[in-house]
Image: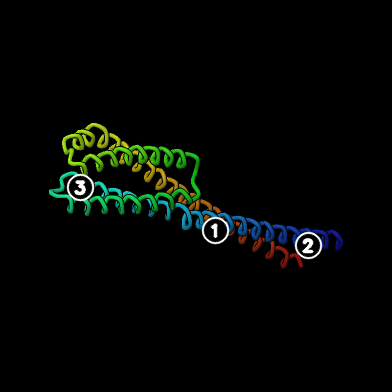
Amino acid sequence: MKQNGSILWIRSIITALVLCLAMASIGMIGSGFLFRESRAIAENTLPSLSHMALANQTRGEAFVHLMRAVNAKDSEEFQKEKAEVLAYSEWTQAELDACRRMAATAVNQQLFDKVMAERTDCLKSRDVILLMSESGDRKSADKELVTHFLPMYHQYLDNAQILVESLSRDGIHQADKIGMISRYTQVFTFVSCIIIFIFGFFLGYTR
């Protein structure tokens, strides 16, 4: 009888140790997942959104200065506005290049490539407009602007916004996963602590 009691007591200890190990393992796995997801948001998602936001802002500035260049009253004003267009365009490109270096899903990469392809077309049309304006051919510059540049530019804007929305959804999805895993880990830890307490209580009682 005493031997059966000892065996039961040993089993209780082993069960309690297994539960402790399981609780520690789940906690480590959960903590590792939370760390990876949090790091992905901090190092990839948020910087990508920041770079895209700056790219959209500087792109808008470049567009404003392009309009001013087309409507410049003299060569000096035109050259000044042209320099602003090129400067803001370079800034936009730098922000987009920084966004490209961020880790991205396949969907976001496809959206980004589409945005960049449309940007290339817009820049080609922009250069034609600047060349015509510089030569004094205002009529041809206006026609190129209305016929080719603006439709491409609006499409460029729309797809850039789609990319921003996709990046935002990824961030929200990652945050939701962090919250879900955190809750599950807390529940498992709470339940495990109760079970370990019960085993400990009975273990002490049987002794």
In the displayed image of the protein, which residue is found farthest to the left? 73
Kindly state the secondary structure of the residue where label 1 is placed: helix
Whole-angstrom CA distance, mark 3 to mark 1, is 50 Å
Residue drawn at x 86%, y 63% is: 2
Q: Amino acid at mark 2?
A: Trp
Give x and y (percent) for residue 75: 17, 50
Q: Quadrant of the N terminus?
A: bottom right
Q: Element type at marker 2?
A: helix
Q: Nearer the viewer, residue 59 or 42?
A: 59
Report the residue marked by disc 2.
9
Report which quarter residue 156 is drawn in.
top left
Q: Which mark is residue 35?
A: 1
In the rendered structure, find residue 158 and report the number of the disc placed on it: none
Residue 123 figure quarter: top left
- Can you say whether 107 is above or below 32 in the image? above
Distance between the Cα atoms at labels 3 and 2? 88 Å
Measuring 61% from the left and 61% from the top, which residue is drawn there? Answer: 193
Residue 18: image x %, image y %?
A: 72, 58
Q: Is residue 100 left or right of residue 69?
A: right
Question: Considering only order in the chain, which callout, 1 or 3, is on the residue closer to the N terminus?
Answer: 1
Q: Name the secondary structure under disc 3.
A: helix
Give neighbour class at mark 2: few <14, some 14-19, many 20+ (Cα, 10 Å).
some
**Spatial CA span between label 1 and label 2:** 39 Å
- Asked if disc 1 and disc 2 are in contact, CB closer than 8 Å, the reply is no
Q: Kindly identify which numbered label has been placed on residue 69.
A: 3
